[in-house]
Image (tube, helix red, strand yellow):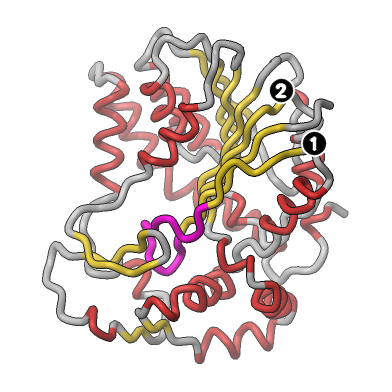
Amino acid sequence: MTDAGASSLFVSDRAARIANYDRGWSALCDSVVASVARGMPLTELLARYDAMIGAYTGFIPDAVLRQIPRVDLGHFGGHPAPNRLAVRNGRYLAVTQPQNTNEFFDVIASVVDPEVDCIVEFGSGLGFNLARLRLRLPHQPITYIACEPTEHGRRAAELAFSADPRAKLQTHAFDYAEPDLDFLGRFRKIIAFTVHSVEQMPVLGETFYRKLLATSVAHCFHLEPVGWQRYTELARSVLDMHRDAETWQAFCQRMEFVIEDSQLIKNAAQWSVFCGYNTDLLSIIAGVVDRGEAALTAVSYEILGLNPLNPSTLIAWRRTRQR
């Protein structure tokens, strides 16, 4: 049994989650096929994707509202379109434009030096996050690696990067539950990152990080909705609910989201309970740091919220002990 297989209601749902993503991305993959066939450059492909995911669907996205039983907007009630609820640096605010992750990718690009020969994303989706870095680093001879469990995600990444003939891309089928990182063995200096993919593992366990640290990874960056995990009792409570179907179901029926800054952490934890999201990334990274294998270079809790109920935390570390 893998570490991640230990004790969660949601482990058995993992294959279904992956299949659902694959079905959802098949149409997007077809769109990328058509766009590349028309000669659309990578910059325009990325712009079209960003416009799609940033499209206005309400003050709180309709896809989010449909899933929750109750939400109290408080003083945020009555905002007309195109206002939308966002999170920025631990606070709720109303904005008129979709949030972006430029800051995160700027931070990654800032540590790339001439020795870096590989940038790998785990849970790479359609590959557009890797494309953001390629466009920031057009002259660096870097191999970009898309590690993704879905077939359509890997195919879309290959197609998107084909619009840039000078770019080097590899794709690999990947699952956090059974991580095989042997393909990283030939690289001398690796930068790794994740964007809301660890969230899909209720219990990540130690295996993935143990294997990552066995490679030549020099820097790692996470943009994941795990800031609430810094509250130990809250993290333990969420994990307990993940382990008990009856308790989980009762909680999901009565939960309410109150849109006030004082409730932001509670809301994020509730969303994690509801979705079966990750409960242990912060503690795993803390163990790596405590053992002297890495040093934190950045931690920004609840830095932004593309989904305001699932705000992203930035965590970055550099290697301090060579393998």
Residue 72 image offset from top left, x and y in percent: 33, 86
Asked whether, in this view, residue 228 is left or right of residue 26, the answer is right
Asked whether, in this view, residue 1 is left or right of residue 181, the answer is right
Residue type at numbered disc 2: Leu
Q: Badge 2: few (under 14), some or many (20 or more) residues near its Cα, within 10 Å?
A: some
- 233 and 239: which is toward the camera: 233
Q: Residue at x 70, y 72 (%)?
A: 232
SS state under label 2: helix
In space, the residues marked 1 and 2 are separated at their CA atoms by 10 Å
Assign the N terminus to one quadrant of the image.
Answer: bottom right
Asked if marks 1 and 2 touch (Cβ < 8 Å), the reply is: no
Residue 138 vertical position relative to residue 321 in the rendered view, above or below: above
Residue lying at the far right of the rendered structure: 1
Asked whether, in this view, residue 210 is left or right of residue 60, the answer is right
Question: Does the magenta segment cover residue 170?
Answer: no
Residue 148 image offset from top left, x and y in percent: 58, 37
Question: Does the magenta segment cover residue 304?
Answer: yes
Residue 290 image offset from top left, x and y in percent: 80, 49
Asked whether, in this view, residue 220 is left or right of residue 259, the answer is right
Residue type at numbered disc 1: Lys
Which region of the structure is painted magenta?
300-311
Q: Residue at x 42, y 65 (%)?
A: 90
Residue 264 vertical position relative to residue 186 in the rendered view, above or below: below
The residue that disc 2 covers is 184
Residue 209 image offset from top left, x and y in percent: 76, 43
Quarter-of-image position of residue 167: top left
The residue that disc 1 covers is 211
